[in-house]
Image (cartoon, rainbow, N blue to C red):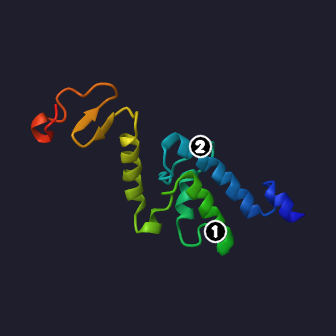
Amino acid sequence: MAADLEALGIVWDRADAAGEEDLGAARPYFQTYATLAAPVGAAILGKPVGQWLANARKKDGLGKAPERAGRRAALLAEIDPDWNPREYDGTVDWQHHYAALKTLAAPGSVSGTWSPGRWSTGSTSAAGWPPSSRTGSG
């Protein structure tokens, strides 16, 4: 019976219930900022998502039970695969920069799109950039 209720998303553990609330704040934060590289003071929906993520990145921050911690890490990775840069020897500062560049380079972003030899802001090339002498294209 407990497994059936768990499959329906009914949470029995207080720590899991708090984790679900925190994930409930992480999702709209990611939708708004395209990253979970939240500053420690960041909050959304009245939840201190930045502090929660900073704590989650610490040793045993997602819980000491390996199954629970793994489940929580997987849920965060579903939202943002780069939520924990320490998994690949990165830093949160690196994650902030990466998220900013990813947003700027996204197709249709305000900054336009870039590919080697061409810069465009949509349907037309940006006047004079890149210089034709550097790329060989106009």
Q: Nearer the viewer, residue 125 or 98?
A: 125
Q: Residues within 10 Å of mark 1 (few under 14, many from 20)?
A: some
Circle 1: element type: helix
State how many labels appear: 2
* Circle 2 residue: 28
| Residue 113 picture quarter | top left
Locate the C terminus and report the quarter of the image it occupies: top left
| Residue 14 picture quarter | bottom right
Percent of width and height locating residue 114: 29, 39
| Left or right side of 93 for 19 | right
Q: Earlier in the sequence, mark 2 or mark 1?
A: 2
Rounded to the nearest angstrom, the CA distance separating label 2 from label 1 is 22 Å
Circle 2: element type: helix
Percent of width and height locating residue 64: 65, 74
Query: Do the residues bearing badges 2 and 1 touch, measured as CB atoms within 8 Å?
Result: no
Q: Which amino acid is tagged 2?
A: Pro
Q: Which amino acid is tagged 1?
A: Ala
As displayed, is residue 122 above or below residue 53? above
| Left or right side of 86 for 63 | right
* Circle 1 residue: 69
Residue at position x 68%, y 72% in the image: 67
> On residue 52, which mark appears?
none
Residue at position x 9%, y 37% in the image: 133
| Left or right side of 12 for 127 | left
